[in-house]
Amino acid sequence: MPTTTTEPTLFDLIGGAPAIEAAVSEFYRRIVADPQLAAFFEGVPMDRLARHQGAFLTAALRGETPPGAAAMLRRVHAGLGISDTDFDRVCCHLVATLQSLVVSDDLIGRIASGIVPLRSEIVAIAADPDATCAFPALR
């Protein structure tokens, strides 16, 4: 009987559900501690947000883009006034989070390549030419 092999997904490569849980927890710890980003999360039920983020990342890293994901991202970020600088800061916090969890730069780059295209669904304020991020894959 022939055996089939499947390539491991990014979800598998970073360590599955325990890695997602650790990453989401650390990611939000960093974001709410960032004075530039904290106001976006005032009054937000962080446990609920973390569950949604964990589910979204799990699906995305498995290569299973949820139907209507782009519309959902636009809807939940509408009216927040998120700038390119804010988006970049969030991405840099994600990179720092993944680095703290000893995810390889190659995997971080692969994850980032799936996040960068979401910019247009989230950002409401045009680019800041002085914005910087320590991880070039995010630019």
Image (cartoon, rainbow, N blue to C red):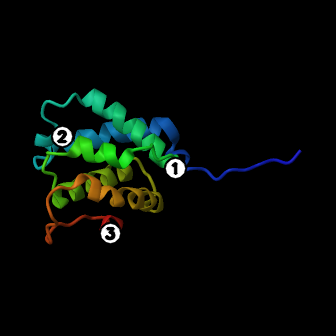
Where is residue 43? Give x, y as percent.
Answer: 13, 30
- Residue depicted at 48% across the width and 36% down the height: 17
Residue 111 image point, x, y percent: 43, 56
Q: Which residue is mark 2?
A: 32
Tell me, yes or no, whether the two marked residues, 2 and 1, touch with CB atoms within 8 Å.
no
Type of amino acid under label 2: Val
Q: Amino acid at mark 3?
A: Pro
Between discs 2 and 1, the one toward the N terminus: 2
Q: CA distance from mark 2 to mark 1?
A: 28 Å
Q: CA distance from mark 2 to mark 3?
A: 24 Å
Crowd band around label 1 with a 10 angstrom C-alpha radius: few (<14), some (14–19), many (20+):
few
Where 32 falls versus 109 (above or below)? Answer: above
Is 108 above or below relative to 13?
below
Q: Give the x, y percent position of residue 132.
A: 20, 67
Residue at image x 47%, y 57%? Answer: 107
Residue identifier under label 3: 136
